[in-house]
Image (cartoon, rainbow, N blue to C red):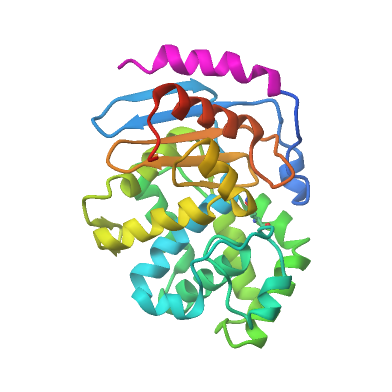
Amino acid sequence: MDYQPLLEHIRQEIEVYAHDGKQADYIPALANVNPDQFGLCLNILDGRTYHLGASDVKFSIQSISKVFSLAVALSLLGKELWQRIGKEPSGTAFNSLVQLEYEHGKPRNPFINAGALVTADVILSLIDNPKEFFINFVRTLADNPDINYSEEVTRSELSCCNLNASIAYLLKHHGNLHNDVHDVLDFYCTMCSVEMSCEDLSRAFMAFAKSSQPFSHAGVNLSISRVKRINAIMQTCGLYDESGEFAFLVGLPAKSGVGGGIVALYPSRYSIAVWSPRLNSKGNSIMGMKALELFTSETEESIF
Ligand code: DON
Protein backbone atom coordinates (compact mmCIF):
# COMPACT_ATOMS: atom_id res chain seq x y z
CA MET A 1 0.00 0.00 0.00
CA ASP A 2 1.17 3.55 -0.80
CA TYR A 3 0.38 5.52 2.37
CA GLN A 4 1.13 8.97 0.92
CA PRO A 5 -2.36 9.73 -0.53
CA LEU A 6 -3.93 8.66 2.78
CA LEU A 7 -1.58 10.94 4.75
CA GLU A 8 -2.43 13.89 2.46
CA HIS A 9 -6.12 13.15 2.99
CA ILE A 10 -5.65 13.04 6.78
CA ARG A 11 -3.87 16.41 6.65
CA GLN A 12 -6.95 17.94 4.98
CA GLU A 13 -9.37 16.26 7.38
CA ILE A 14 -7.64 17.61 10.49
CA GLU A 15 -7.40 21.19 9.21
CA VAL A 16 -10.66 22.02 11.03
CA TYR A 17 -8.79 21.56 14.34
CA ALA A 18 -5.89 23.81 13.31
CA HIS A 19 -6.73 26.58 15.77
CA ASP A 20 -8.03 24.54 18.70
CA GLY A 21 -5.98 24.52 21.91
CA LYS A 22 -2.71 26.29 22.53
CA GLN A 23 0.94 25.44 23.03
CA ALA A 24 2.33 24.74 26.51
CA ASP A 25 3.29 27.97 28.21
CA TYR A 26 4.11 26.86 31.76
CA ILE A 27 7.67 26.38 30.48
CA PRO A 28 8.41 29.93 29.22
CA ALA A 29 10.62 28.81 26.29
CA LEU A 30 7.82 26.62 24.89
CA ALA A 31 5.43 29.59 24.77
CA ASN A 32 7.59 31.10 21.99
CA VAL A 33 7.03 28.22 19.57
CA ASN A 34 4.86 28.96 16.50
CA PRO A 35 1.76 26.90 17.36
CA ASP A 36 0.57 26.57 13.75
CA GLN A 37 2.85 23.79 12.63
CA PHE A 38 2.20 20.16 11.80
CA GLY A 39 4.54 17.33 10.87
CA LEU A 40 4.28 13.56 10.53
CA CYS A 41 6.64 10.73 9.68
CA LEU A 42 5.75 7.07 9.21
CA ASN A 43 8.36 4.29 9.11
CA ILE A 44 7.19 0.89 7.96
CA LEU A 45 9.53 -1.81 9.22
CA ASP A 46 9.99 -3.14 5.68
CA GLY A 47 12.03 0.03 4.98
CA ARG A 48 9.49 2.45 3.51
CA THR A 49 9.26 5.98 4.98
CA TYR A 50 6.52 8.57 4.41
CA HIS A 51 6.60 12.27 5.34
CA LEU A 52 4.03 14.97 5.72
CA GLY A 53 4.36 18.70 6.45
CA ALA A 54 7.08 19.85 8.84
CA SER A 55 8.41 16.32 9.40
CA ASP A 56 12.03 17.54 9.54
CA VAL A 57 11.50 20.43 11.98
CA LYS A 58 12.98 19.80 15.43
CA PHE A 59 10.85 20.42 18.52
CA SER A 60 11.12 19.86 22.25
CA ILE A 61 10.36 16.19 22.93
CA GLN A 62 9.65 16.79 26.65
CA SER A 63 7.96 13.72 28.16
CA ILE A 64 8.73 11.51 25.16
CA SER A 65 12.22 11.41 26.72
CA LYS A 66 10.67 9.32 29.52
CA VAL A 67 10.58 6.29 27.21
CA PHE A 68 14.32 6.65 26.57
CA SER A 69 15.11 7.13 30.27
CA LEU A 70 12.95 4.12 31.17
CA ALA A 71 14.86 2.02 28.62
CA VAL A 72 18.20 3.08 30.15
CA ALA A 73 17.06 2.62 33.77
CA LEU A 74 15.52 -0.79 33.05
CA SER A 75 18.66 -1.97 31.30
CA LEU A 76 20.72 -0.83 34.32
CA LEU A 77 18.57 -2.07 37.18
CA GLY A 78 16.45 -4.85 35.66
CA LYS A 79 13.35 -5.91 37.57
CA GLU A 80 14.56 -4.17 40.76
CA LEU A 81 13.33 -0.98 39.10
CA TRP A 82 9.74 -2.07 39.81
CA GLN A 83 10.42 -1.89 43.55
CA ARG A 84 10.85 1.87 43.15
CA ILE A 85 8.25 2.60 40.41
CA GLY A 86 4.85 1.02 39.70
CA LYS A 87 3.34 0.11 36.34
CA GLU A 88 -0.28 1.12 36.70
CA PRO A 89 -1.98 4.08 35.02
CA SER A 90 -2.26 6.98 37.44
CA GLY A 91 -5.54 8.49 36.25
CA THR A 92 -4.06 11.81 37.34
CA ALA A 93 -2.23 14.63 35.58
CA PHE A 94 1.42 14.08 34.64
CA ASN A 95 2.61 16.45 37.35
CA SER A 96 0.17 15.48 40.11
CA LEU A 97 1.50 15.27 43.65
CA VAL A 98 -1.51 13.91 45.55
CA GLN A 99 -1.25 10.20 44.70
CA LEU A 100 2.47 10.18 45.45
CA GLU A 101 1.78 11.30 48.99
CA TYR A 102 -0.75 8.62 49.85
CA GLU A 103 1.24 5.94 48.03
CA HIS A 104 4.30 6.74 50.18
CA GLY A 105 6.65 8.02 47.50
CA LYS A 106 6.30 5.18 44.98
CA PRO A 107 5.27 6.71 41.62
CA ARG A 108 2.46 4.90 39.83
CA ASN A 109 4.46 4.50 36.60
CA PRO A 110 7.67 5.67 34.87
CA PHE A 111 5.86 8.14 32.55
CA ILE A 112 4.41 10.54 35.09
CA ASN A 113 6.91 13.15 36.22
CA ALA A 114 7.45 11.43 39.59
CA GLY A 115 8.35 8.17 37.85
CA ALA A 116 10.72 9.85 35.42
CA LEU A 117 12.46 11.65 38.31
CA VAL A 118 13.18 8.19 39.72
CA THR A 119 14.51 6.84 36.38
CA ALA A 120 16.68 9.99 36.17
CA ASP A 121 17.96 9.21 39.68
CA VAL A 122 18.80 5.61 38.71
CA ILE A 123 20.79 6.78 35.68
CA LEU A 124 22.62 9.43 37.74
CA SER A 125 23.61 6.78 40.28
CA LEU A 126 24.92 4.22 37.81
CA ILE A 127 26.37 6.11 34.83
CA ASP A 128 29.53 8.27 35.01
CA ASN A 129 28.64 10.89 32.39
CA PRO A 130 24.85 10.60 32.31
CA LYS A 131 24.14 13.54 29.97
CA GLU A 132 26.64 12.32 27.38
CA PHE A 133 25.48 8.72 27.72
CA PHE A 134 21.82 9.67 27.30
CA ILE A 135 22.24 11.91 24.25
CA ASN A 136 24.51 9.35 22.62
CA PHE A 137 21.81 6.70 23.14
CA VAL A 138 19.13 8.91 21.56
CA ARG A 139 21.39 9.86 18.64
CA THR A 140 22.17 6.19 18.02
CA LEU A 141 18.49 5.17 18.06
CA ALA A 142 17.57 7.96 15.64
CA ASP A 143 20.73 7.51 13.57
CA ASN A 144 21.30 11.28 13.73
CA PRO A 145 24.42 12.76 15.37
CA ASP A 146 22.90 16.28 15.19
CA ILE A 147 20.37 15.70 17.97
CA ASN A 148 21.06 17.88 21.03
CA TYR A 149 19.74 19.17 24.31
CA SER A 150 18.38 22.71 24.28
CA GLU A 151 20.17 24.68 26.99
CA GLU A 152 17.55 27.42 26.64
CA VAL A 153 14.66 25.03 27.33
CA THR A 154 16.52 23.35 30.22
CA ARG A 155 17.26 26.73 31.83
CA SER A 156 13.72 27.93 31.21
CA GLU A 157 12.17 24.86 32.86
CA LEU A 158 14.62 24.93 35.77
CA SER A 159 13.69 28.56 36.41
CA CYS A 160 10.09 27.61 37.18
CA CYS A 161 10.01 23.96 38.22
CA ASN A 162 8.51 24.35 41.68
CA LEU A 163 6.01 21.56 41.16
CA ASN A 164 8.63 19.07 39.95
CA ALA A 165 10.85 20.19 42.83
CA SER A 166 8.00 19.44 45.26
CA ILE A 167 7.61 15.98 43.72
CA ALA A 168 11.36 15.41 43.97
CA TYR A 169 11.46 16.45 47.64
CA LEU A 170 8.55 14.14 48.43
CA LEU A 171 10.39 11.27 46.69
CA LYS A 172 13.52 12.16 48.66
CA HIS A 173 11.54 12.24 51.90
CA HIS A 174 10.42 8.66 51.21
CA GLY A 175 13.96 7.52 50.38
CA ASN A 176 13.11 7.06 46.69
CA LEU A 177 15.72 9.54 45.38
CA HIS A 178 19.34 8.71 46.15
CA ASN A 179 21.00 11.75 44.57
CA ASP A 180 20.82 15.43 45.43
CA VAL A 181 17.39 16.83 44.48
CA HIS A 182 18.91 19.66 42.40
CA ASP A 183 21.09 17.24 40.43
CA VAL A 184 18.07 15.03 39.67
CA LEU A 185 15.97 18.02 38.58
CA ASP A 186 18.80 19.32 36.39
CA PHE A 187 19.23 15.93 34.67
CA TYR A 188 15.47 15.38 34.31
CA CYS A 189 14.91 18.83 32.71
CA THR A 190 17.95 18.30 30.47
CA MET A 191 16.52 15.01 29.16
CA CYS A 192 13.14 16.68 28.53
CA SER A 193 14.86 19.44 26.52
CA VAL A 194 16.11 17.12 23.74
CA GLU A 195 15.05 18.44 20.33
CA MET A 196 14.07 15.98 17.62
CA SER A 197 11.96 16.01 14.45
CA CYS A 198 9.16 13.58 13.58
CA GLU A 199 11.66 11.86 11.28
CA ASP A 200 14.10 11.40 14.19
CA LEU A 201 11.42 10.18 16.60
CA SER A 202 9.80 7.77 14.20
CA ARG A 203 13.21 6.29 13.35
CA ALA A 204 14.21 6.09 17.04
CA PHE A 205 11.02 4.25 17.97
CA MET A 206 11.56 1.61 15.30
CA ALA A 207 13.86 0.01 17.90
CA PHE A 208 10.82 -0.44 20.20
CA ALA A 209 8.60 -1.53 17.28
CA LYS A 210 11.09 -4.27 16.37
CA SER A 211 9.78 -6.11 19.37
CA SER A 212 10.74 -9.57 18.15
CA GLN A 213 14.45 -8.68 18.31
CA PRO A 214 16.56 -8.04 21.42
CA PHE A 215 17.29 -4.33 21.91
CA SER A 216 20.99 -3.43 21.97
CA HIS A 217 21.90 0.18 21.21
CA ALA A 218 24.73 2.37 22.57
CA GLY A 219 25.20 0.30 25.72
CA VAL A 220 21.47 -0.11 26.44
CA ASN A 221 20.49 -3.78 26.33
CA LEU A 222 16.95 -5.07 26.79
CA SER A 223 15.50 -8.52 26.23
CA ILE A 224 12.48 -9.02 23.96
CA SER A 225 10.34 -9.36 27.07
CA ARG A 226 11.57 -6.02 28.50
CA VAL A 227 10.77 -4.20 25.24
CA LYS A 228 7.31 -5.76 25.44
CA ARG A 229 6.96 -4.30 28.94
CA ILE A 230 8.02 -0.81 27.84
CA ASN A 231 5.47 -0.96 25.00
CA ALA A 232 2.80 -2.17 27.45
CA ILE A 233 3.42 0.81 29.73
CA MET A 234 3.21 3.13 26.71
CA GLN A 235 -0.17 1.57 25.98
CA THR A 236 -1.55 2.00 29.50
CA CYS A 237 0.23 5.18 30.68
CA GLY A 238 1.75 6.95 27.65
CA LEU A 239 -0.84 9.71 27.41
CA TYR A 240 -1.37 10.20 31.17
CA ASP A 241 -5.00 10.54 32.18
CA GLU A 242 -5.96 10.37 28.50
CA SER A 243 -4.38 6.93 27.93
CA GLY A 244 -7.78 5.20 27.96
CA GLU A 245 -9.23 7.64 25.44
CA PHE A 246 -6.14 7.27 23.24
CA ALA A 247 -6.38 3.44 23.35
CA PHE A 248 -10.07 3.77 22.45
CA LEU A 249 -9.54 6.19 19.56
CA VAL A 250 -6.13 5.13 18.21
CA GLY A 251 -5.26 1.71 19.65
CA LEU A 252 -1.47 1.83 19.68
CA PRO A 253 1.24 2.06 22.36
CA ALA A 254 2.37 5.70 22.32
CA LYS A 255 4.04 8.50 24.25
CA SER A 256 3.22 12.19 24.17
CA GLY A 257 5.04 15.33 25.28
CA VAL A 258 3.95 18.90 26.02
CA GLY A 259 6.08 20.07 23.08
CA GLY A 260 3.19 18.70 20.97
CA GLY A 261 4.82 15.47 19.82
CA ILE A 262 3.26 12.01 19.94
CA VAL A 263 5.06 8.88 18.82
CA ALA A 264 3.22 5.59 18.44
CA LEU A 265 4.08 2.13 17.21
CA TYR A 266 2.55 -1.08 15.94
CA PRO A 267 4.84 -3.92 17.08
CA SER A 268 6.57 -5.63 14.14
CA ARG A 269 4.87 -3.28 11.62
CA TYR A 270 5.53 0.45 11.90
CA SER A 271 6.33 3.48 14.00
CA ILE A 272 4.74 6.89 13.45
CA ALA A 273 5.51 10.32 14.91
CA VAL A 274 3.29 13.40 14.72
CA TRP A 275 3.84 16.92 15.98
CA SER A 276 1.63 19.93 16.38
CA PRO A 277 2.12 22.27 19.37
CA ARG A 278 -1.52 23.08 20.21
CA LEU A 279 -2.53 20.93 23.19
CA ASN A 280 -5.77 19.87 24.83
CA SER A 281 -6.42 20.20 28.57
CA LYS A 282 -4.55 16.93 29.28
CA GLY A 283 -1.36 18.22 27.64
CA ASN A 284 -1.66 16.15 24.45
CA SER A 285 -1.48 17.45 20.86
CA ILE A 286 -4.97 17.92 19.42
CA MET A 287 -4.06 17.57 15.74
CA GLY A 288 -1.58 14.81 16.55
CA MET A 289 -4.23 12.70 18.26
CA LYS A 290 -6.72 13.32 15.44
CA ALA A 291 -4.17 12.38 12.78
CA LEU A 292 -3.36 9.11 14.56
CA GLU A 293 -7.02 8.31 15.10
CA LEU A 294 -7.71 8.77 11.38
CA PHE A 295 -4.59 6.81 10.42
CA THR A 296 -5.46 3.66 12.39
CA SER A 297 -9.16 3.93 11.50
CA GLU A 298 -8.62 4.32 7.75
CA THR A 299 -5.87 1.68 7.53
CA GLU A 300 -7.60 -0.60 10.06
CA GLU A 301 -4.09 -1.13 11.44
CA SER A 302 -4.29 -0.84 15.21
CA ILE A 303 -3.28 -3.54 17.68
CA PHE A 304 -6.94 -4.15 18.57
O1 DON B 1 8.19 18.11 33.67
C1 DON B 1 7.45 18.65 32.87
O2 DON B 1 6.41 19.19 33.21
C2 DON B 1 7.88 18.65 31.42
N1 DON B 1 9.30 18.72 31.31
C3 DON B 1 7.38 17.44 30.68
C4 DON B 1 5.88 17.23 30.77
C5 DON B 1 5.28 16.57 29.59
O3 DON B 1 5.79 16.59 28.49
C6 DON B 1 3.95 15.96 29.79
N2 DON B 1 3.44 15.48 28.52
N3 DON B 1 2.39 15.53 27.99
Measured from the top left, where is residue 60 in percent x and y? 60, 44
Part of the protein shown in magenta: 1-17
Q: Is residue 60 left or right of residue 135?
A: right
Residue at the extreme left: 213
Front one among 285 and 180: 285
Q: Is residue 48 left or right of residue 174?
A: left
Residue visible at 57% across and 81% down? 177
Q: Quadrant of residue 16?
A: top right
Residue 248's place in the image compared with 15, above or below, is: below
Report the magenta stretch's main SS. Answer: helix
Residue 274's place in the image compared with 133, above or below, is: above
Q: Is residue 146 left or right of residue 62?
A: left
Image quadrant containing the N terminus: top left
Residue visible at 57% across and 48% down? 244
Q: Is residue 287 left or right of residue 74?
A: right
Measured from the top left, where is residue 18 in percent x and y? 70, 23
Image quadrant containing the C terminus: top left
Q: Is residue 2 magenta?
A: yes
Measured from the top left, where is residue 230 in percent x and y? 40, 58
Measured from the top left, where is residue 203 in percent x and y? 37, 38
Residue 286's place in the image compared with 214, above or below, is: above
- Residue 144 visible somewhere in the drawing: no
- Residue 214 visible somewhere in the drawing: yes
Front one among 253 and 203: 253
